[in-house]
Each structure stands twice: as C-alpha cells, then as structure tokens.
Amino acid sequence: MREKHDMDIEQYFIKDDLIPAIIQSVETREVLMLAYMNRESLQRTLETGYTWFYSRSRQELWNKGATSGNVQKVLRISPDCDSDALLIEVWQTGPACHTGNMSCFYQRGSLFNGVEEP
Amino acid sequence: MREKHDMDIEQYFIKDDLIPAIIQSVETREVLMLAYMNRESLQRTLETGYTWFYSRSRQELWNKGATSGNVQKVLRISPDCDSDALLIEVWQTGPACHTGNMSCFYQRGSLFNGVEEP
C-alpha cells in the first residue's frame, strides 16, 4: 500500500528524542489528537501503516486502537518546514479520544470563542 | 469580539512550561503550523485575538506576522482532553510558512504517501 517513504528518519530527532505528531482525519479534515513519536514508534508506523506513539507518562510505545479497536490507518505523513513536527492524515476507526468523542479537542472553543466571521 | 475565554490558564502548564499549539485554517481546514506557547504568549493571544508564540531557539515571545504581515486572527481555541495541547483555528493572512508556502507542512506526503482509499 505504501508508495513512498523515506527511511532516513534521524533528521526528525535532531532537536529532541520525541516529535509531536498532529493527527488529522482524511475524511472530515478534523484535527483528532496530538501525540508524540520517538524513532521506534515512527519506524513502526512507517512499517505497518497504522499509528504508533510514545507515551511520555508510561514511557512506552503504544499502538493507537490496540485495545479499543479505534485504529488509525495512515494515508500520508508530512514533516514541517524545520523537521520538528509531523502532520499525519488518517482514516480513523471509531472515536479518536478515550472519552468517546471523535476528537480529543471536543471542548470546542472552551478557551476562546470568537465570532464566525473574519 | 471575544465571546468567552477562561483566564484560568494555569491548568495548561502543569506538565510543562510550554504547550504545543496546532494552527488550523478556518477557511480551508488545512493544518498550517505547530508552535509553542508559554503562559505569557497564550495570555497575549487571548487578549489581542491574534496569535503569539514562544520561540524555543530564540527564547522570546513572537507575534506571528509582526514582521511579514501574515497575521493569524483567532476564531477559536480548544484544549485537548488532557489539557496538554491546543487547537487554534485562525483566519490566516497570506502564507503561514516562512518559506512562502501556505502551510509549514507543504512537503506533502514526503515521509509516507499511501493510496487515496481506506
């Protein structure tokens, strides 16, 4: 299924051993969550086509959806201009958030909510 | 213009003095960039309605677009489920990336590019 991926991932871990990964739904364009990857979790994501992250609190790798079934199949991984963030577009099965909400950002506008025009 | 904002921002800085902020275009739903906020930059963003960040390399606050004119007017700020990431929806003036690209994630799929079907 993979058409291209660059296995030289060291460039994404120059500043830090962890890189933040933004997960966005292919279908709705909604931002679903932010999680962190270390080299091994990025490598596993590239190899399997499903997201793997590194939990800072548990200090271990985790495969998103391994217990809940709410997996994320990867369409595309795009690095940012200075190689210190990743945008990962996925097909999300079920809700992305452990609260049962589709997105972890479900408290929409709770910190700031402006008007719907520029 | 602001309808609501919660000034109790300390809850977003419990784990770390910096919180990652995902910037998404209101109009295109494109993810434009990821940057970091400390307490002061989040406070200034809430007060002004335009994005302010904290530069880890320069160790200073910066107002996005202050020199380029490519400012980000904030529509909505949404915290994630465990209060350690922010999603900020903005009206972006001009390109968001210093390279002149609309998004900092312009190297689309350069790390992984799957097929366009689930």
Image (tube, coloured by chain):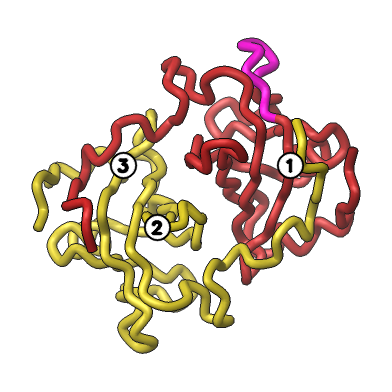
Chain colours: A red, B yellow
Residue that label 2 marks: B27
Relative to A61, say whether B99 is above or below. below
Lateral position of residue A48 relative to residue A51, left or right: right
Residue that label 3 marks: B78
- Residue A22: x and y in percent read 56, 46
Q: Residue furthest bottom?
A: B67
Check if residue A68 falls in the magenta segment: yes
Badge 3 or badge 2: first in the primary sequence: 2
Task: Please name whichever residue, A112 or A118, is drawn nearer the observer in this view of the structure.
Answer: A118
Lateral position of residue A2 relative to residue A104, left or right: right
Q: Amino acid at mark 3?
A: Ser
State which chain disc 3 sits on: B
Badges 1 and 3, same chain:
no
Check if residue B64 falls in the magenta segment: no
| SS state under label 2 | loop
User: Which residues make up the magenta segment?
Assistant: A65-72
Lateral position of residue A63 relative to residue B36, left or right: right
Q: In the image, which disc is placed on residue A75? A: 1
Q: Residues within 10 Å of mark 1 (few under 14, many from 20)?
A: many
**Residue displayed at 69% across by 56% down:** A78
Q: Amino acid at mark 1?
A: Leu
Quadrant containing the C terminus of chain B is top right
The reply to whether dot 1 and dot 3 touch (C-beta < 8 Å) is no
**Residue displayed at 44% across by 53% down:** B22
- Residue A116: x and y in percent read 22, 51
Q: In the image, which disc is placed on residue A59? A: none
State which chain disc 1 sits on: A
